Amino acid sequence: MAIEEYIGYMSRGGRGPGGDELRRKAKERLLSSGWTFHMKRKYDGRQELRYMAPHGASYISLIVACKKYQQFSCSSTSRPPRPNRSGKAAASSAKPSGKKRGRAVHGGRKETDAAGSDEECSTTAVGPPCAPRTKKRRRVSALYAGDALKKSAAAKKKKASASASPAASRVLLPRPKDGDKTQVAAAALVPSSCQPSRARTILAVLVEKNILRPTAKLSYRRTTRGPAVKQGTVTGDGYIRCLCGCGRGAFTVAEFAAHANGGATTERASAHLFVGDRRSLSQCLVQLMRADVRKNRGSPTPSPSPGARVKRKCTADQEDGDGVCSVCADGGEMLLCDCCPSAFHHGCVGLDATPLGEWFCPPCRCAICDSGEFEPAADEFTDKTVICCDQCEREYHVSCIRSRGDQLECCPEGPWLCSQKCSDIFQRLQGLVGRSIPTSVAGLSFTLFRSSKLPEEEAMAAEEHGKLRMAFDVLHECFVTLIEPQTQSDLSHDIVFNTESWLRRLNFRGFYVVGIEKGGELITVGTLRVYGDKVAELPLVGTRFAHRRQGMCHLLMNNLEKLLGELGVERLVLPAVPELLQTWTESFGFQVMSQSNKLEIAEHTILCFQGTTMCHKFINKAAPPQR
């Protein structure tokens, strides 16, 4: 029978002569059985062939349609079996047992007919006959496709009442301002309404969180119980207006402290600023940090851990329920890794077809032996225990590490670095965290921050948290909030605060925040991750509206490239939107990445967004700074 012959042909990898003839016969058999074919316009304008069964379900793949036809014809029920919550289809006596291996997953989405009824397309795992695949249900969110339906009728009503605009595509949306098209941002540009600007300084954040009262009085004191040297009040936009009659306008926290000290800079100025109730600004920052920790305590994404990471086994609920490629962030037919819960397009990892047997994605392979086999983390190391480098994110078997002469008997309590190069880069970046590096423009400095869970004084951690909150506010001013469907959290927040995940595309452990700072206020912000000396990525860049068209982004990029050159990093990559692709290539010297360029760095999961073009720039290595 044509259907069985085509299924058998595809189970062998879809290779060999006669493939076109088998596809033609399978389609003819479906048509003669009451199936219909039609073209569906996708959210990006492309046409896509769909196969619709007599009972109304629509399928995106011919092999899936044939398997559903076969199940339907052999079943006594009027509908094919539907996947359950775990992603597996109902048990069948005809279904053989076998171990799950490399799986090709065909994406699908709901179809709506003229009467308004919804039918969801199932997705089926395909593999060799000796290892049948379990079925996986793909959950398509409105954030990923403009024509995707909402999860439930309640969600439809809620979104319809909240906004009359169509669902957004799964990209970060730069917020337009007065027709300004020069905003340099590594995200897709989609028209959206302009939301009110968020807080510009840490004082405005504290007022917004009801930790400081509006128009609160502040005094600068050299000691806790000493006399007030200068006094001021908090303004509505988060600055300090001095009450000494100097007439110099509003100050940031750092500028007000310098003003009180006759122009000299003050280390940890927030410890010398006191509110009327005798609280220091440092204590207010601690209160803010504790409130944020309590708010995010229930988040499904773990926080950064201070010690070395030892690989553990992932559970079924950690799989990528949205069926999104970890390389290009698009949907479609996916190949699932047998080691981590991530999904990939065949072409994105350099494959033409689904491989037989187990398949491990490039980031899950040992950097020495190229094997993905491992034993879950236990109290003691075994030869197959896998440990991750805290700088380049590459994975290593303990036995492979020992074979090159390194003594590794137990899990390190602190960060573990795989090589001297990674160690040098890690130490250099950690030494720059919190420091202000003067730039070529007077009054502007280049800064670098990172969320850290290393044991330290709470007040120091609160200072760092406050800086990250300011960087988060810059991104919120520049981009519309994006809620990630998999975690239901703000994506820009996860990047800034280094949330972790064993799902590759949602693991932001290694990100730093780089920025241009003026008097304690962040003007331009970028998110940076350095994968050893091979590649660094910069997925987000944003400048506050009031400081655009002043060369702030160029200043940030010049200082960043200088730093990467000192670290010995070979190239910098970023996703560019179509409207700004020419700006990145002509003004900043980037080049569009070819498929071979992308495969050269396939062992690293580079953050990408739908509708963007990946660009790279090779860095001129500079001599290391004198110590």
Image (cartoon, rainbow, N blue to C red):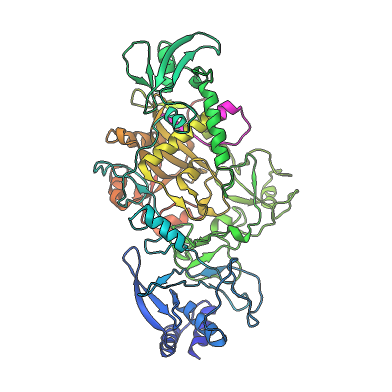
Quarter of the image for residue 290 reads: top right
Q: Residue furthest right?
A: 380
Left or right: residue 258 compared with residue 412: left
Q: Nearer the viewer, residue 336 or 88?
A: 88
x and y percentages locating residue 155 in the rendered image: 45, 59
Quarter of the image for residue 231 reads: top left
Q: Nearer the viewer, residue 298 or 437?
A: 298
x and y percentages locating residue 159 in the rendered image: 40, 56
x and y percentages locating residue 323 in the rendered image: 49, 63
Magenta stretch: give its range: 446-461
x and y percentages locating residue 596 in the rendered image: 42, 58
Residue 531 shows in the view = yes
- Say whether residue 453 is magenta: yes
Residue 610 shows in the view = no
At horizontal 65% and vertical 79% (from top left) the residue drawn is 96
Residue 423's place in the image compared with 173, above or below, is above
Left or right: residue 533 compared with residue 560: right
- Say whether residue 582 is magenta: no
Residue 564's place in the image compared with 481, above or below, is above
At horizontal 50% and vertical 23% (from top left) the residue drawn is 281
Q: Nearer the viewer, residue 599 or 46?
A: 46
Q: Residue furthest top?
A: 227
The total number of labels drawn is: 0
Residue 59's place in the image compared with 178, above or below, is below
